Image (tube, helix red, strand yellow):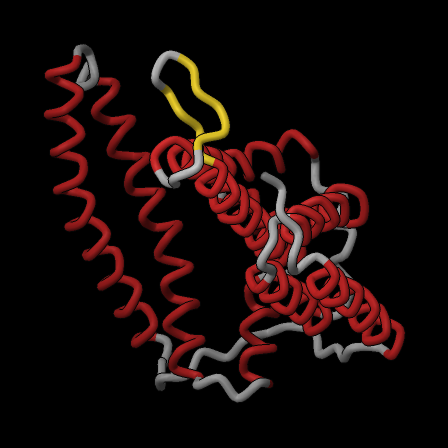
Amino acid sequence: MNVSVDYYAHTNGLRNTSPAFKMALALITMIISLASPTPLIPFTVAVLMTLIILLLADIPPAYYLKFAAVPAGFGLLTLILMALFFGVNPVWSLMGIKVYSDGLNTGLLVFSRIMGGFTCLAFLALTTPLNEIFQELERLRVPRAFTEIALLMYRSVFIFLEEASVMYHAQDTRLGYSGIRNSYRSLGLLAGNLFIRSWLRGEALYRSMESRCYQENLPSMGKQTSTSPGELALLLLFDGLLVLGVILTSRLTIF
């Protein structure tokens, strides 16, 4: 999954669009979605950003559905639990199971905010390479130590996944997951050894950086682009309409 995210970030249909524009669009839209007091605008954001990802960025629908399945599942679970166990005004009851209107409204709001925020971050992750994001953060005077630590953490994710994959397949070929008891035992061994192996790989990475004259500075390479007037106008129009929608729907109730 992480390798695919990095691949699509370099090959999507919006690859040549200004990174600053994409970052501003994603972050400002996410803030508007989270600030909305009703679920209508966050749901609208989720739909619009999904259309941009699928149609303009040309991300395969099957991959995007898989990418969005986990946050959508957590959001639906939150919605169901809040509708069933939070509230004082039941609107539906069957065999002792009650659905509360205030819990359902709150659950819908939380679910919509989850999906609205996720689609904004998914748009940024699937359309903008990480090195360009870090370059924009440096232009915004974010401390360089922060961006370098984030870059090393991002690389460590792949080390973590690689080590876990190698260890899992080694256990699987030795019938380590044949049965529930063996599966739990193998999983415990994998978790314990994975920390040690990842630590050793991190130490090896630091030594390799030191051998290449590392001086607490990781130069990043990327193209320098600026936001065009057309992109700025599009950003103001898009997010301005969303802000207007938040104002007009601030008193809207669904249940």
Q: Is residue 230 left or right of residue 33?
A: right
Outermost bottom residue? 141
Image quadrant holding the C terminus, namely top right
Where is residue 184 shown, x and y percent of the image? Answer: 14, 24
Q: Residue at x 69, y 33 (%)?
A: 61
- Residue 63: which quarter of the image? top right
Front-lying residue, 37 or 69: 37
Outermost front residue? 89
Number of labels in the image equals 0
Front-lying residue, 45 or 167: 45
Where is residue 217 shown, x and y percent of the image? Answer: 41, 83
Q: Is residue 146 visible?
A: yes
Where is residue 124 shown, x and y percent of the image? Answer: 62, 58
Q: Residue at x 58, y 58 (%)?
A: 37
Front-lying residue, 27 or 245: 245
Q: Residue at x 67, y 49 (%)?
A: 40
As displayed, is residue 248 above or below residue 141? above
Q: Residue at x 80, y 73 (%)?
A: 236
Q: Is residue 145 left or right of residue 138?
A: left
Q: Is residue 74 visible?
A: no
Front-lying residue, 13 or 210: 13
Q: Is residue 222 left or right of residue 152?
A: right
Where is residue 134 shown, x and y percent of the image? Answer: 54, 73
As displayed, is residue 41 above or below residue 76? below
